[in-house]
Structures are given as structure tokens and as C-alpha cells.
Amino acid sequence: MILASLQQVEKWYGEQTVLDGVTLELRPEERLALIGRNGAGKSTVLRLLARSEVADGGTVYIRPGVSVGVLDQAPTFEPGATVGRVADESFAELDALEGQLVALEARGLDDPETYERWEDLHGVFERRGGYVRRARRDAVLHALGFAGREGDPAMALSGGEVTRLGLAQLLMSQPDVALLDEPTNHLDLRMRTWLEGFLRSYPGAVVLVSHDRAFLDAACDRTAEVTRGEIRVRPLAPTAYREADAERRRIDAATRANQEREHARLEAAALQMKRWAGQNEKLARRFKAMERRAERYESEMVEELAGPEGTTRFAFPAPPSVEIALIARHLSASYGETLFRDVQLTLRRHDRAVLVGPNGAGKTTLLRIVTGERPSDDPRASIEWGARVRVAYYDQTLSRFDPEATLVETLIRLVGDRRAHDLLGRFMFPFEAQYKQVKDLSGGERARLALLELTLSEANVLVLDEPTNHLDLEMIEALEAALEAYEGTLLVVSHDRRLLSRLATRVWEIEGGTFEEYEGDWAFYERKRRERRGEASPPIAVAPGRARGQGAAGSRADDGDDASDGRDGRSTWRLERDQVASEGEVARLEGVLEAARLEVEEAAADPDADHVRLAEVGERFERLERELLEAMARWTSLDELLRRRRDA
């Protein structure tokens, strides 16, 4: 059953085509990750599904009776509303539905028409979790940090708490289609883990836009990429989708190389045919046909060579540093209550320390003390940076830049006229955007400018506070690669578990007014944390409406080597056997194709070659090329099945 869909939808903004005939369908229990570069059209897709924007062409369909909920990053509440009252407002429709059921029951259900009406309403009430809504209310408020705060005024909440309360309200109302744009904003790691489990068991359809790759992989079973006005959908989590896309590009590159060889062969054959054509009318017609084929092949090659969007790459140069980069003693801070007290820190050359803890624990405050932007509350505090240490602090507020200056003017002051446009282009600022004023930049643009500045700092210590916020997945991966290659010292605050797991060599945790240091990587920290709390494994939340154990990919049997992944009935050992056979077939065809290529080249280069033989070897080469690509596709499919099976 389709809950909502876009059918051949088109959308323009001025002369810019954002969506060009796209199609997307949403069904119950579907978790769809919507990915793409910033500005590609992800938010436009959400607005169209929410009916807050009108398509310029095609059809936006919402099934009658289906409710659509949209996460508002800056929700507003009525004056005087409390957290508890906002939570109760989530059930306004269910309360009204319950009232109708009670009224029908009071009239009696003996009349068939009345009973049928009651049955329809009761089905909706049950499907939307009407009987468990109070339990859902308590569970969601507790998980998102509002336990015991039902009486707090909503107007007195911080910006992050307001956003979290808006998310809580949406989850409690349990719409049939939930559109969540950056739902992990202002959620700490524990809240994100809970939300993953809740969404995996959500009975309706969920569309997620997020920069948190671990969150998307855990919560989603399908990926839709918005790129160049199109939407590509595959039944894979985002990381698996991007890996498959990279493999597709590799195969495309191999195909283009074969196309180039085939084009060269056709041109050589056409020249040979031209020499023969002067003496034979039939051969002259064959020459014209071959010439047209070569031209058609060349036009197809040019279209294929357009390829995917470019990839961003950058680096953080780091001058040499001393062995001890930082020694800090007696760091303390409080805002009404103690955040941390008497913290002692040491950073060595090449350390990659990550600072974690719940929202409001004091992570940013500690960074500001270390970088000298705020004093410690303890008068004994001392912060000593090593000789030749240069510190750069990632600052998305861009407070060091003139807000009235344009991007290109800002860069010219830093690097001069010759490099300014090139650097901005490398950080995904198209030429026309380079003349925007700093004050008019979007969140993603501000983040990219801050990163660009960081690459010019030549610092050997980088202090980064939530560096992945507002970046798209491609830019996050580029940042991750740059930080992995960085030769200096890192101190990072982030909720991006993928980034933390790739970088961390030490973990510092602030929680409940205490500071704890873990001398190990992210996996070591998570293991020690679970041991300390007596947890066997991370907790999983289950939303009403689906059974525990049925995650994003549906229920799975757990029968060892004979386990099915839900998509293929073959046992694991059969899949492995088939993959080995497929790999052998690919290797065989590669060898045969190379021999066929040499045969084509020899035939084309031979001035005495028979034109019939030339056509035969060319057709054989094309057939083998198609067989090789099909074999590669089979091997890739088996590899994806086995990877999902092993990860299950």
C-alpha cells in the first residue's frame, strides 16, 4: 500500500531545475534515507510531501486518511504551555477519535451501519497506538531528557530543548508518514541510540535527512539520492548505497575504457573499409554504415563520460610540534550547578582526543577554557601550550570575518586574488555564490567557509566543536579523510560516531559533573562504558505497532550458516560458493576479453585483413564485453548479500 508518492514531479526555482520528473513512493514500515549534496533538493522533496510547497509538474499523492508529520527545527508553543501540556497536545486527534468511539458505543453497536463506522474508527485508533499513547508519552519524554520536567514552562527551554520537545511531540503523535529533517540536532549519543531503535520499529513510513552516517545506517533500509534533478532509489542503507555507487562508477570507468578501445577499433576498421570501398559498391555502403556506427558510439561515449558529480578533497597542513602539546590543570566550570571540577588534561603530539557527554554537560565550555575564550572558575587553573604550538579553533559563527564582505573578498584578504576563486570552487562554492555576503550564508556554506579557513591556518593543533554539523555526506567524508591524514594533534567534540570511531585514540567523557579519561580508541571506550554500567549491549527502543526484533530490514532468522537475510533464500555457504564461482567467471572473461581485444587490434591493423573476419571479431568482442559486465554485476550483488548476512 502506497501512503504517499511523487509521480514525475518537476520543480523549478527561477531558471534552476531542482527536480526533473522524479518519482518516489513511500509504504508502511519503510525507513528511507534521503541523501544528496547541500542544495540538491532534499528539503524541496520534504516540502512537497508535506504539501507546504506546490510542484510545477507531475503529481504529489497522499493517500486519503494518511497523516503526515513534519519535524520543525524551531517549533513555537502557546504562551503558558508546559512540557506536559505540549506532550498531551500530541494526542489531540487520538483523543477526539476516542471520543467518537465512546459516543458510538453509547448509542449501541447493534445497527450494522453504526458498527461498521465504529470498526473503521477503531482500526485507525488501534493502528495509531491509541491504547498505548500514555506509555509512549512517558517513554519518549524520558528518552529525550524531559523526565520529571512536565511542569516546566515551554517558553523557558533552551533552543536545543525546544527542538527536542518538537521531536518528542511528533514521535508521540505517530503520523503515518514522518518527515524528519536533521532529527539528531541537539541529541546526545544516548538519545541518538534510543531514536535509532524507536524508528527501526516505527509502524509508519519515515523519511530521514541527516548528516549522522551511523544514525542513517542504523535506522534506514532504503536510500534515495537527490542528484542533478533526479532521485535514485536502492534498497540499501546509505553506506552500502555509496559503496555500491562507487563500485558502479568503477565498472562505468572500465566500460568507458572499453568503449574508447572499441571506438578506436571502429575508426581503424572504418579506415580499412574506406580503402576497400573504392573498388566495391557493397563495401562502400558497409563503410558508410560503419562510419555512422563510429559516430553514434562516440556520441554515446560523450554522454556516458558526463559521469557522477565531482568529489571534494582537501588537507590540513601541520608544521612540526613538540612532544607535549598541552598541559592544563585545575579546570573547573559551573552554571548554577557544577559542570566539571579540577580537570587535568595532557595532550601529546599526534593525540586524537575526543570529548563526549550529554547535552549541557559542559563540552563546549571546556573547549572554550582550553582555547582561552573563557576563564576557569578555579583560580589555580593553568593552561600551558608547548613551544611552537599553533592552535586553530573551528568556529561556525565566523566571528572573525566581516559580515558585510563577500566570500571572494574574504578569501582575497587571506590568500590573494589568484587563489581565491580556485579555493572557493574546491569547497563547492560555484562562481555566482562567491559574491554572497558572509552574513547571508546558509548553515552549510558557513561550515564550509570555516573549514576552508582551517586549511589555511597551518596549525599543528586543531580544536573542533561539532565539525560535521550542516555538512552533507560527501563533505563529511572529505573532512574525515583530511583529519585521518592530519599529522598534528586533534581535540574534537562531535556526535558523529563514524567520525569518532575513525579518529579517537583517547576519549574524555563529561557527565554528571565528573570527568573520566579513557586511554584507548572508540571501541575501547564503548566497551568500558558498557562494563561500568553493567550493559551487555547497547539498548534498543521499540515503538508501538511492531514486534521487538523486527528492525529496518524486517525479522531475520538466527540459524547460523543457514540464516536467511530476508531477501535471498540461499544459505550463507551457498552464497559464498556462488561468489567464488562468480569471481572465477569474472577472471576467465577478463582473460578471454583481453585476447579478443588483441585479435580485434591485429585484424584492424592488418591491411590485408578480410572484412568479414573483422566484423566477426568485433561482434565477439562486444558480446564478451557484455558478458563480463553481467558477471561483475552478479559478483557485486552476491558480495552485498553476504555483507548484509554477516552484519545481521
Image (cartoon, grey):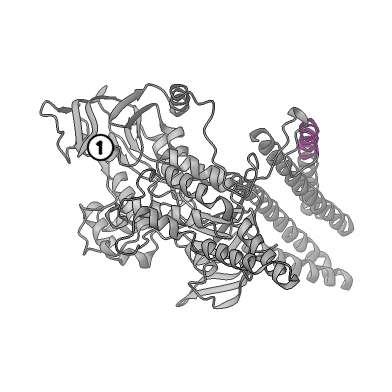
Queried whether the magenta region covers residue 284, the answer comes back as no
Q: Position of residue 579 (x, y in %)?
A: 76, 36
Q: Position of residue 540 (x, y in %)?
A: 55, 38
Quadrant of the image for the N terminus?
A: bottom right
Quadrant of the image for the C terminus?
A: top right
Q: Position of residue 211 (x, y in %)?
A: 46, 49
Q: Quadrant of the rendered structure where residue 436 is? A: bottom left
Q: Quadrant of the rendered structure where residue 122 is? A: bottom right
Residue indicated by mark 1: 367
- Give the left or right position of residue 594, taking residue 229 as reference: right
The crowd level at tag 1 (other Cα within 10 Å; few <14, some 14-19, many 20+) is many
- In this picture, is 77 found above or below 64? above
Q: Amino acid at mark 1?
A: Leu
Q: Quadrant of the rendered structure where residue 325 is? A: top left
Residue 24 in view in this figure:
no
**Closer to the camera, 123 or 64?**
123
Element on which disc 1 rests: helix
**Closer to the camera, 115 or 45?**
115
- Image point 21% across, 34% down: which residue? 370
- Give the left or right position of residue 223, taking residue 397 as reference: right
- In this picture, is 624 found above or below 24? above
- Image point 14% across, 36% down: which residue? 375
Q: How many numbered marks, from 0 up?
A: 1
- In this picture, is 288 found above or below 330? below
Majority secondary structure in the magenta region? helix
Range covered by the magenta-colored residues:
570-588
**Closer to the camera, 178 or 461?**
178
- In this picture, is 446 found above or below 117? above
Q: Position of residue 456 (x, y in %)?
A: 28, 45
Residue 80 in view in this figure:
yes
- Image point 50% across, 45% down: which residue? 195
